[in-house]
Amino acid sequence: MCGPGRAPVWTGWPVGARVVVRRSLPEGGLGDVLGDLLEVDATGMLVATRRGPVRVDADDIVLTKRVPPAPARRPAR
């Protein structure tokens, strides 16, 4: 979280960082977005997920966290 008049910590994260974002969903409840940052500014962020890019507005963000890179995929058996 951030104090009054301070920008959220995620606004300083570099493009390409791997993140997980917990957000409020329009239908109620919460959902997670996991992927690499494509864009980030005070209005929100664009995250590249496995299913494509997802825009998360700042007002919908509940929690954020930087996470380690995705593990390497295993070869098919």
Image (tube, helix red, strand yellow):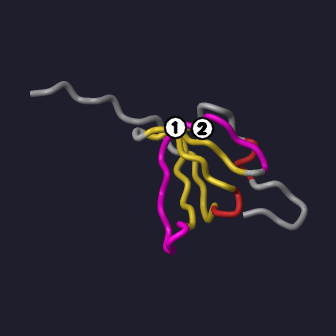
The amino acid beneath tag 2 is Leu
In front: 5, or 55?
A: 55
Q: Look at the numbered disc 2 and give the secondary structure of its residue.
A: strand
Drawn side of residue 52 relative to residue 19, left or right: left
Image quarter hosting the C terminus: top left
Residue 26, percent from left and from top = 55, 68
Does residue 36 belong to the magenta stretch? Answer: yes
Q: Range of the magenta residues? A: 25-42
**Name of the residue lying farthest toward the left:** 77
> Does the magenta stretch mainly form a helix, a strand or a loop?
strand
In front: 53, or 11?
A: 53
**Name of the residue lying farthest toward the top:** 75
Does residue 53 belong to the magenta stretch? Answer: no
User: Mark 1 sits on what residue?
Assistant: 48
User: Mark 2 sits on what residue?
Assistant: 37
In front: 41, or 3?
A: 41
Q: Which mark is residue 69?
A: none
Relative height, residue 24 to residue 52 (above, below): below
